Amino acid sequence: MKINLDKYNFKFKVINYLIMSGAEQNKFEWRTQSVKGLIRFWFRWAGGSEENEQKIFGGLGEQANASKFKLICSPIKFPTSITDNTQDIYRRLSFGEQYFGYPFRFRSVQREVLKIYNILQISIIFYPAASEKDKKFALSSLWMAVNLGNFGTRARRGFGSLICIEEEPVNPYNILFVNKESNERRNWYQVNLRHIQNIFKSQLNFEVYLINKKLDEIGRIYKEYRIREYSTPDRKIFGLPIKGQSGLKPERFASQFIIKPLDKNNCLIVLNTNPILPKEWKNMGKNYFLKEIRGFINELNPTKIYP
């Protein structure tokens, strides 16, 4: 007997350089495992429970279960000269973008870079065991991954940004993937985030700001702000490692805010309001940590759109 599976197809346009690879580090690969990992990451960042995470995405251990959906990632359209290596890209970046993409300058492995305007596809197929609740959680997490975050190397600093240009069929859960009125971004984001908040049944664990500045300008302000306001060790608030400070503990700490380019002139910043701080930073309370990062965001004259 043939089983009908719910399947949703999404097409995305690359709007900033995307770097992603698999076993062959020098080759671009639109990796299903990496994309699914980011969807799961956004479920956690939003405040999804561990129980629901295991149920929807799958898990390990005695109570393990299989994922409730299958993900297929594929390229759709590659224009001429689809790739370039990171060091060549770095030389063409503006000053502020170079600050965010600084590691590209020193990559020992030459890596292919997917240029802007390429078209990528994600298909999500739900198995019969998936409940309506499971589907809402998975689709809303995919929405957040695409519309609040980026993909690949240096994703938290603006690289690997995508926008959805086509959804087929349109999902029945009022999660709007395609923004048909780009000049109404604020309202579009607020409507979707309120709806996702209702799915999660609580306020989401992040703040979202609209920044009417280019990624280059944000990078310039970010560099100047860090140097002006903080001694070198104290810059750990913005993420580790820090060049020349290998003795800092922990050795690595991911930045708790993400910069999402929307086009050439506008970006979002998403700030995690429930960070798990390293034990070595026990003297730094969460409120102090958030206050310091909000200080930088306020330098950008932001418009807060959530909550």
Image (cartoon, rainbow, N blue to C red):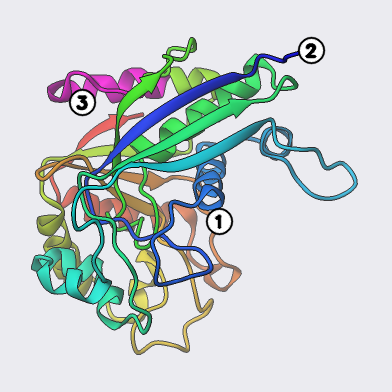
Cα gap from disc 3 to disc 2, whole angstroms: 45 Å
Residue 219 or 105: which is nearer the viewer? 105
Seen in the picture, residue 285 relative to 6 is either above or below; the reply is below
How far separated are the C-alphas under marks 1 and 3?
30 Å
In this picture, which residue range is highlighted in magenta? 177-194
Residue 220 location (% of width, % of height) = 12, 64
Q: Is residue 64 magenta?
A: no
Tell me if residue 203 can be seen. no
Task: Check disc 3 and report the residue beneath it.
Answer: 185
Q: Amino acid at mark 1?
A: Ile
Residue at position x 55%, y 22% from top? 7
The residue sitting at the right extreme is 62
Q: Main secondary structure of the magenta part?
A: helix
Q: Secondary structure at mark 1?
A: loop
Q: Secondary structure at mark 3?
A: helix
Percent from the top left, x then y, of residue 83?
26, 61
Asked if residue 189 is among those painted magenta in the image, a careful observer would answer yes
> Viewer-nearest of labels 3 and 2?
2
Q: Earlier in the sequence, mark 3 or mark 2?
A: 2
Q: Is residue 149 left or right of residue 70?
A: left
Query: Which of pointers 1 and 3 lies earlier in the amino acid sequence?
Result: 3
Badge 2, how many Cα within 10 Å: few under 14, some, many 20+? Answer: few
- Who's the residue at 53% across and 61% down the image? 277
Nearest-to-viewer mark from 1 and 3: 3
Q: Please give left or right for residue 217 compared with residue 49 in the image.
A: left
